[in-house]
Image: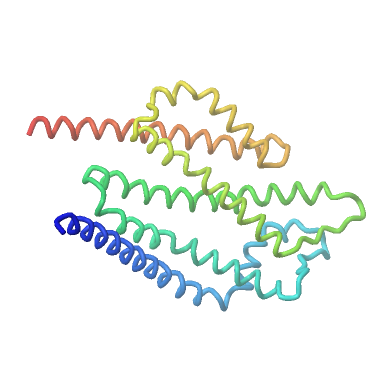
Amino acid sequence: MKNSQPIDAADGGFVSHLIELRNRLLYIAAGIIPVLLLLLPFANKLYSLLALPLTQQLPEGATMIAVDIVTPFLIPFKFVALLAIFITVPFTLYHIWAFVAPGLYQREKKMVAPLMVSSTVLFYLGVTFAYLVVFPLVFAFIISTAPAGITVMPDIARYLDFAMALFLAFGVAFEIPVAIVLLVAIGVTTPAALAGKRPYIIVAAFIIGMLLTPPDVVSQILLAVPMWILYESGIIASRFMLRRRGNDVNTESAS
């Protein structure tokens, strides 16, 4: 009977964590659904805005097409659902933070909050960069290479999948500074070691730019240079973090 109390306490703690997780998920859903309902009346216009970098490059008289019968309804709806999730990312991250925060040390709390904010901003910047810079270059190249006599008329469903894949790729790519800070924070590497790998990173950035863009020098530079800048930003941020951590340790020692 004496051993049953710790077990019961552990079970109760596990159940309370599950209840808290369920509540947080409900809060997240409650934040997404109103945004989705607000966006639904504008679904077609928002999809047209998403497709604008492609439709501006289409030959005169060419349009996008919908192959399946229900696609004209489902695809704009799918897009605004994804857009609602995208818009409410800060709200979602807040509840993720609220769920994990009680289990973190004070120093970890000070580090995680800025990282969550910066990762959100960088992801938004990556998506914006893809839409404003990469999309026009990619679609202009693809359409210009179409064989003579072939009319380019992309399907709206496949365009959405392509756009979401690029958004995700560039959003994740712009998380480079956050990834570097985390690696340095947990002791996997150091700013000095990262700086020593700079030549390899520059080459890798241009290779990635070559793979993700049309085969012209301008578009490759437009991708490679931001990635290199983000890498350097991550090194600077990690040095600043270590300097602050050292100052905090010295302050605690002095007190």
Judged from this view, the residue extending furthest toward the front is 1
- To which quarter of the image does residue 211 belong? top right
- To which quarter of the image does residue 179 belong? top left
The structure residue drawn at horizontal position 39% and vertical position 70%, both measured from the top left corner, is 26
Judged from this view, the residue extending furthest toward the left is 255
Of residues 206 and 136, the one nearer the viewer is 206
The structure residue drawn at horizontal position 62% and vertical position 36%, both measured from the top left corner, is 208
Q: Position of residue 222 (x, y in %)?
A: 60, 39
The structure residue drawn at horizontal position 72% and vertical position 37%, both measured from the top left corner, is 216
Q: Is residue 63 left or right of residue 131?
A: right
Q: Is residue 131 left or right of residue 93?
A: right
Judged from this view, the residue extending furthest toward the right is 149
Q: Position of residue 18 (x, y in %)?
A: 33, 63
Q: Position of residue 71 (x, y in %)?
A: 71, 72
Q: Which image quadrant: the N terminus?
A: bottom left
Numbered disc total: 0
The structure residue drawn at horizontal position 35% and vertical position 63%, both measured from the top left corner, is 21
Q: Which image quadrant: the C terminus?
A: top left
Considering only vertical position in the picture, is 238 above or below 117?
above
Considering only vertical position in the picture, is 123 above or below 9?
above
Q: Position of residue 118 (x, y in %)?
A: 39, 48
Considering only vertical position in the picture, is 183 above or below 40?
above
- Its colouring scheme is rainbow
Of residues 97 and 131, the one nearer the viewer is 97
Q: Is residue 133 left or right of residue 171?
A: right
